[in-house]
Amino acid sequence: MAGFVVLLIGMVANIFLQMPMLHLAMSSMFILFSTGVILLTTQQIVRGGETNYISATVSLYVSIYNLFISLLSILGIMNND
């Protein structure tokens, strides 16, 4: 939960500061956060702790989507000519 708060504060700061390195750092942290959410949700599904499979599937989908968007953002920054 603390990681999410740090990400949220960093995103708001990046809106006003417009620093490319902060954007890169936030995207990298968001990749790690999304990966953790994917691992946690998958573990809950496999071990039987998750009884609502629809919300678990939506959570996995959103995490994979966010992971993909963050990767595209990082690759877009690295591709500036």
Image (tube, rainbow, N blue to C red):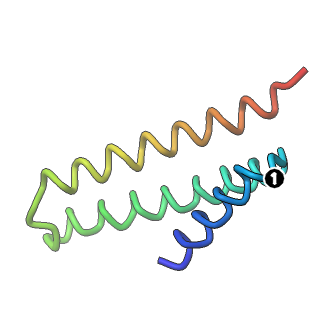
Q: Residue 39 vs residue 73: left or right? A: left
- Extreme residue in the left direction: 51
Who's the residue at 81% across and 33% down the image? 78
Count neighbours of disc 1 (C-alpha within 10 A) and say few if under 14, some if 14 to 19, many if 20 or more: few
Total count of labels: 1
Who's the residue at 54% across and 79% down the image? 2
Q: Residue 18 vs residue 41: left or right? A: right
Q: Residue 68 vs residue 48: left or right? A: right
Who's the residue at 39% across and 62% down the image? 39
Residue closest to the eye, 23 or 49:
23
- Extreme residue in the top direction: 81
Could you tell me which secondary element the residue under label 1 belongs to?
A: helix
Q: Residue 45 vs residue 28: left or right? A: left
| As drawn, 39 above or below 61 | below
Residue 53 screen position, x and y as percent: 12, 55
Residue holding disc 1: 17
Q: Label 1 amino acid?
A: Leu
Residue closest to the eye, 16 or 10:
16
- Extreme residue in the bottom direction: 2
